[in-house]
């Protein structure tokens, strides 16, 4: 599976962005998806995840209520709608997929075996 993330950019605090991640390759296989981010000088952290079977979602506390993850099976695409952005959200955002769906959102990077290249999100104050 190849993952291509897009939609990042520069936005002012309080603004919104929508990230997209398109999966190609062996997309006939069910897989859970997730978004992670890494800011300069910080470790990669979980942002949001969604399951294949039921589209059950999970979020990091720092983004809960502001970000929404969703997926379109027909387009093999997962989205991350980000609202009320603040400078602390500045990071490279990467999408990830696991070919071993677990039935609940996976929040640990180690559980994912496919990764996209990342898209930069910069929020100015």
Image: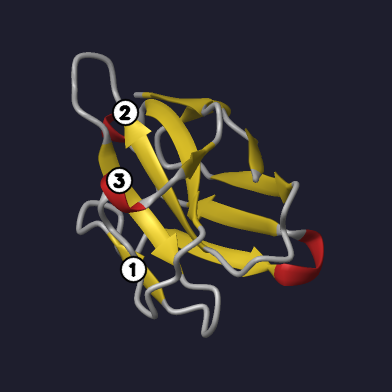
Say few, some or many: other residues with alpha carbon within 10 Å of mark 2 (under 14 / 14 to 19 / 20 or more): some
Question: For the residue labelled by badge 2, is the local secondary structure a helix, a strand or a loop?
Answer: strand
- Can the viewer see residue 85 in this picture? no
Give the CA separation, mark 1 to mark 2: 18 Å
Counting the numbered discs, the total is 3
Relative to 55, is 105 on the left or the right?
A: left
Q: Position of residue 97 (x, y in %)?
A: 50, 52
Q: Which numbered disc flags the more N-terminal residue, 1 or 2?
A: 2
Residue holding disc 3? 109
Q: Residue at x 80, y 61 (%)?
A: 75
Q: Position of residue 105 (x, y in %)?
A: 36, 69
Q: Which residue is drawn at 40% across and 34% down?
A: 13
Give the CA separation, mark 2 to mark 3: 12 Å
- Which quadrant holds residue 113? top left
Q: Nearer the viewer, mark 2 or mark 3?
A: 3
Give the CA separation, mark 1 to mark 3: 14 Å
Residue holding disc 1? 58
- Which quadrant holds residue 27? bottom right
Residue holding disc 2? 38
């Amino acid at each position: 599976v190849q993952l291509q993330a897009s939609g990042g950019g520069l936005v002012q605090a309080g603004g919104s962005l929508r990230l997209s991640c398109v999966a190609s390759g062996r997309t006939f296989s069910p897989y859970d998806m997730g978004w992670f981010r890494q800011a300069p000088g910080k470790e990669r952290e979980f942002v949001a995840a969604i399951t294949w079977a039921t589209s059950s979602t999970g979020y990091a506390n720092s983004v809960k209520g502001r970000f929404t993850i969703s997926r379109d099976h027909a387009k093999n695409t997962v989205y991350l709608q980000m609202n009320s952005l603040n400078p602390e959200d500045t990071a490279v955002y990467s999408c990830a997929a696991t070919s071993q769906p677990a039935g609940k959102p996976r929040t640990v990077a180690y559980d994912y075996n496919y990764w996209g290249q990342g898209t930069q999100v910069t929020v100015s104050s």
